[in-house]
Amino acid sequence: MASNGPVLTERRASASDYLKFLHAWLRKPRQTASIVPSSPYLGRLMAAQIDPAGGRVIEFGGGTGALTREILATGLPADHLEVVEIDATLARNLRRSFHGVRILEAPAQSIVGDSAGGAGGYQCVISGLPLLAMNKALQGAILAEAFKLLAPGGSFIQFTYSPRPPVADVVADALDLGVERVGTIVRNVPPATVFRYRRAADIAQD
Ligand SMILES: C[S@@+](CC[C@H](N)C(=O)[O-])C[C@H]1O[C@@H](n2cnc3c(N)ncnc32)[C@H](O)[C@@H]1O
């Protein structure tokens, strides 16, 4: 594991993480959308899409930090990571667990103004948001905000429990985005597939 100063004290998902997640689900089932945190295998596949020396990363929907932990394990400096979490209790726990990481207790669909990097300041958005449970208007607002944050060439990485891409075609088309399948992780409950969204112009340049 790469050196990350204080975050080396971090541990894998514990029974208390599962309980925190279950409580969040009981408070707001549609917003949490799962009763167990993502597995380390899923977190690693998502985190592998970032360049640890490539600048700022922002995570949408931090939950108990299952993806956060794997993002930091790549060697990305803690002060290059921000985590957005709408649930006050989960945000407070993330702040306690991940020293040096900026935790934003706010909705991902209006975060540019609160972000340290601002518009165009990020190489990657890693998202654990339950996009499939959201209506098209909210999906559109979240994707639009993500691509405001992303620098040219930047990627929006999203997992989903469906084999199909999680963003409605009409939403992706309106923002001129293309999608690529990264891979499927069966060692996750339930099995999950990771997709990468990029600006269609960036994909065309590959
Ligand atoms: C399915 S959980 C994923 C948590 C964690 N990333 C993981 O993979 O285990 C979704 C998380 O997104 C948060 N969330 C839902 N809607 C949100 C929004 N609009 N803005 C920020 N966070 C949101 C929920 O509170 C929850 O913690």
Image (cartoon, rainbow, N blue to C red):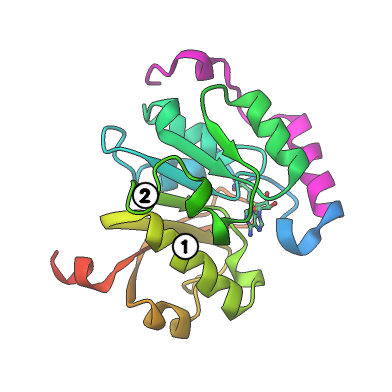
Of 194 and 185, which appears nearest the observer? 194
| Magenta residue check for 129 | no
- Determine the residue positioned at 42% across, 56% down: 157
Residue on which the image places disc 2: 124
Disc 1 CB within 8 Å of nearest ligand 1 atom: no
Identify the residue at horizontal 64%, vertical 50% (top origin): 106
Q: Work out whether residue 160 can be spotted.
A: yes
Mark before the other along the chain sequence, 1 or 2: 2
Image depth: mark 1 or mark 2 in front? 1
Name which quarter of the figure residue 17 lies in: top right
Q: How many marks?
A: 2
Does 206 sit left or right of 200 as displayed? left
Q: Residue at x 17, y 72 (%)?
A: 204
Residue 183 in view = no
Task: Report the disc number at residue 145.
Answer: 1
Tell me the magenta residue range: 1-25
Secondary structure found at label 2:
strand
Q: Element at badge 1?
A: helix
- Count residues near mark 1 (Cα–Cα under 10 Å), then give few for <14, some for 14-19, many for 20+: some
Give coordinates of residue 6: x percent, y percent.
52, 14
From what the image shows, is residue 196 above or below residue 8? below
Could you give the CA–CA distance between mark 1 and mark 2, rounded to whole angstroms?
13 Å
Q: Residue at x 75, y 64 (%)?
A: 30
Instruction: Please identify the quadrant where the C terminus is shown.
Output: bottom left
What's the residue type where badge 2 is placed? Cys
Looking at the image, is 105 positioned above or below residue 129?
A: above
**Where does residue 147 sit, x and y in percent of width and height?**
38, 62
Q: Left of 165 or right of it: where is 154?
A: left
Kindly identify the amino acid type of the residue bearing the numbered disc 1. Answer: Glu
Residue 172: mark in rendering:
none
- Outermost residue toward the front? 113
Which residue, as the protein is rendered here, is positioned at the far left? Answer: 205
